[in-house]
Image (cartoon, coloured by chain):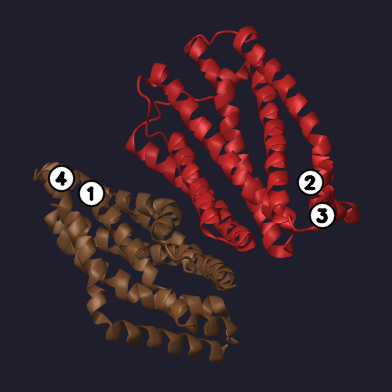
């Protein structure tokens, strides 16, 4: 058990180092997130009332798309250079190794979204009371997106053109997170209680944490076959 | 019992056995479908609120049931294929996906045809409609993944994992969508429980439901047989089948 935990940390450190060495790419999902959100005022008009109504949904849909687009880098390079195959041969459970990789991936792609979201909330005229709810929902929701998405990536990593297919597989599975999170932010904006939605998101996170690494590991084994 | 089942699951035995069953399924489907349509369109009384247009439910409701039923069959067959690596269950899972997607599509189309006279609009973001739409998307994902992977066995295993993930997700999606809808607007939807109380409406509904199940069994077997011939084309029994068919 202790050794497996050690392997977890080593892999996490390795992935973080790799991400740091390619730090030019780190900003891409973040920029995508910001650009998509700023397109909407251009599309629907600058009226602050309209933007306030659609703001939470837009920020969340944009976060969802940003999370999905960044997924491809989760296993791609390790699959190409054979590191993934070595990982699957290691004595440690593959699901734990997957969890380490997903965690590292979330730290570099999901966490920045949470940090920038309050600014986007201001841009979309969200009332100040809902900012914390926006941060909480992103903190609970984006790990779920990374975890559920990892199944889709694991299934398509062996394919040459998996990009569009990945969105087809993963986006329907993201719907519950979107519903609860956007609804929580909407409710917070009108001063309603949001603990129910946050509990639901927490439950989804726990469920995803426990089950998705197993599914991702078995999907990876199929892709490596 | 087990030995008998395992024998049945061998591709060759399944091919022979299903060839004999298909006409039975087809004929009983035809009889039940005609009976159900006659009962539903002519015998069943008019609804006091919805008039004659409610009658589309005799197709709509069984199609919606089938779309859910087939997804579960597909996931179970996929799971069996993952665990025991049986070819037949992989083929059943792969053949079920397009049929289930068609039923989901049929349910969506008939629902929207019914919605026009009832709600005055082709589409409404009602909880049930939306979760049926998402189910359709999940089917599309399974089919797309199946087509994208070259090796049929790997494709079957990958889409089995996806189908199982979908099965875990379907209840979550379904309830979150219903919950989302009820928070946004009150239920303006006329519930199906109204018309289904009357026995004259219940009988054709059940007849159609059984007919659709038989149709699924027949079409599934036909497409599984084709798939089987294609995958086993190099084995001796397929060569034999082809040579007897030619002569």
CB atoms of marks 2 and 4 within 8 Å: no
Q: Give the residue at mark 2.
A: B242
Rendered position, A74 above or below B226: below
Distance CA(mark 1)–CA(mark 4): 28 Å
Q: Residue at x 41, y 84 (%)?
A: A12
Q: Residue at x 60, y 39 (%)?
A: B99
Q: Give the residue at mark 3.
A: B10
Distance CA(mark 2)–CA(mark 4): 60 Å
Q: Nearer the viewer, mark 2 or mark 4?
A: 2
Mark 3 Cα-neighbour bin, 10 Å: few <14, some 14–19, many ≥20:
few
| SS assignment at label 4 | helix
Rendered position, A153 above or below A61: below
Badge 2 and badge 3 in a common chain: yes
What chain is tagged by disc 4? Answer: A
User: B196 or A212, which is in the foreground?
Assistant: A212
What chain is tagged by disc 3? Answer: B
**How far across and how far down the image is residue A120, in percent?**
17, 59
Q: Give the residue at mark 1.
A: A191
CB atoms of marks 1 and 3 within 8 Å: no
Chain that is coloured brown in the picture: A
């Amino acid at each position: 058990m202790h050794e497996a935990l050690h392997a977890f940390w080593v892999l996490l450190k390795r992935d973080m180092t790799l991400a740091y060495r390619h730090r030019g790419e780190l900003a891409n999902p973040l920029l995508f997130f910001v650009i998509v959100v700023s397109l909407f005022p251009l599309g629907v008009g600058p009226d602050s009332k309209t933007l306030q109504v659609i703001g939470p949904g837009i920020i969340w849909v944009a976060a969802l798309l940003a999370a999905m687009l960044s997924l491809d880098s989760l296993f791609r390079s390790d699959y190409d250079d054979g590191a993934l195959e070595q990982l699957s041969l290691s004595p440690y459970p593959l699901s734990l190794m997957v969890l380490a990789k997903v965690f590292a991936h979330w730290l570099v792609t999901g966490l920045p979204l949470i940090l920038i979201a309050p600014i986007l909330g201001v841009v979309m005229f969200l009332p100040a009371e809902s900012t914390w709810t926006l941060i909480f929902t992103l903190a609970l929701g984006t790990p779920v997106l990374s975890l559920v998405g990892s199944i889709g990536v694991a299934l398509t990593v062996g394919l040459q053109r998996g990009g569009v297919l990945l969105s087809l597989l993963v986006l329907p599975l993201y719907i519950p997170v979107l519903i609860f999170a956007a609804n929580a932010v909407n409710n917070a904006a009108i001063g309603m209680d949001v603990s129910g939605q946050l509990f639901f998101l927490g439950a989804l996170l726990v469920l995803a944490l426990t089950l998705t690494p197993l599914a991702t590991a078995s999907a990876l084994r199929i892709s490596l076959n | 019992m087990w030995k008998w089942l395992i024998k049945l699951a061998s591709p060759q035995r399944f091919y022979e056995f299903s060839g004999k069953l298909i006409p039975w399924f087809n004929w009983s489907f035809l009889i039940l479908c005609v009976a159900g349509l006659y009962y539903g369109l002519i015998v069943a009384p008019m609804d006091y609120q919805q008039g004659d247009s409610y009658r589309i439910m005799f197709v709509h409701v069984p199609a919606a049931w089938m779309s859910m039923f087939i997804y579960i069959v597909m996931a179970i067959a996929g799971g069996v294929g993952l665990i025991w690596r049986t070819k037949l269950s992989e083929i059943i899972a792969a053949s079920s996906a397009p049929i289930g997607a068609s039923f989901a599509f049929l349910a969506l189309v008939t629902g929207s045809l019914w919605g026009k006279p009832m709600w005055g609009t082709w589409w409404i973001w009602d909880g049930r409609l939306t979760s049926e739409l998402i189910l359709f998307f999940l089917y599309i994902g399974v089919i797309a993944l199946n087509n994208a992977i070259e090796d049929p066995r790997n494709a079957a295993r990958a889409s089995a994992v996806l189908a199982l993930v979908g099965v875990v997700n379907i209840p979550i999606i379904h309830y979150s969508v219903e919950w989302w809808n009820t928070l946004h607007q009150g239920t303006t939807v006329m519930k199906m429980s109204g018309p289904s109380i009357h026995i004259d409406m219940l009988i054709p509904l059940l007849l159609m439901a059984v007919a659709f199940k038989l149709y699924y069994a027949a079409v599934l077997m036909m497409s599984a047989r084709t798939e089987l011939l294609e995958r086993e084309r190099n084995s001796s029994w397929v060569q034999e089948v082809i040579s007897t068919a030619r002569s």
